[in-house]
Image (tube, rainbow, N blue to C red):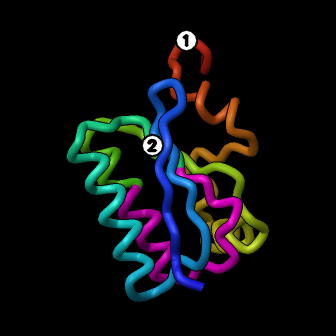
């Protein structure tokens, strides 16, 4: 299954709904390009909804880290939402769970970008 990414905006937060597999090849390139394009447009609040990602390989994990770094270097934040079990397992094994801000529901995730609400 190839990767499909749809973009939507909720309360100033750009949400990328990612469906499929994040693996070596076109899939990681698609994700990289999408996040870089958003960062270039000045989007500072990006949320990756990974609920329908059924597989991620080491290249995909590297791309998550790269996307996180790209957004952070631009003065923004990238957070993860609704991790599938497989993605959750990979982030725990690699200890990257401590790097990413991971949320389980969209409302909380969107509000977590609001400094006042997050306090």
Q: Is residue 99 visible?
A: no
The quadrant holding residue 50 is: bottom right
Q: Number of marks in the image?
A: 2
Which x, y percent locates residue 20? 61, 75
Which x, y percent locates residue 77? 42, 40
What's the residue at 50%, 84% (across, down)? 23
Q: From what the image shows, is residue 11 above or below residue 63?
A: above
For disc 2, the marked residue is 46
Is disc 1 placed on a helix, strand or loop?
Answer: helix
**Mark number displayed over residue 100:** none
The quadrant holding residue 24 is: bottom left
Residue contact between numbered discs 2 and 1, judged by CB atoms under 8 Å? no
Q: How packed is label 2: few (under 14 Cα within 10 Å), some, or many (20 or more)?
A: many
Residue range (magenta): 48-67
For disc 1, the marked residue is 116
Horizontally, is 84 left or right of 49 in the view?
A: right
Which of pointers 2 and 1 lies earlier in the amino acid sequence? Answer: 2
58 is within the stretch colored magenta = yes
Marks 2 and 1 sit apart, C-alpha to C-alpha, by 18 Å
What's the residue at 55%, 51% (across, down)? 100
Q: From what the image shows, is residue 76 above or below residue 83?
A: above
Q: Quadrant of the C terminus?
A: top right
> Who is closer to the viewer here, 50 or 58?
50
Is disc 2 placed on a helix, strand or loop?
Answer: strand
What's the residue at 55%, 11% (across, down)? 116
Of all residues, the one furthest to the left in this rendering is 40
């Amino acid at each position: 299954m190839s990767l499909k990414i749809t973009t939507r905006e909720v309360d100033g937060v750009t949400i990328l709904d990612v469906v499929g597999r994040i693996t070596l090849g076109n899939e990681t390139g698609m994700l990289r390009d999408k996040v870089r394009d958003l960062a270039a447009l000045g989007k500072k609040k990006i949320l990756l909804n990974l609920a329908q990602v059924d597989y991620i390989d080491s290249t995909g994990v590297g791309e998550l880290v790269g996307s996180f770094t790209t957004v952070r270097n631009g003065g923004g934040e990238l957070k993860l939402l609704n991790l599938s079990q497989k993605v959750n397992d990979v982030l725990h094994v690699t200890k990257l769970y401590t790097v990413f801000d991971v949320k389980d529901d969209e409302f909380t995730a969107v509000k977590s970008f609001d400094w006042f609400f997050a306090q």
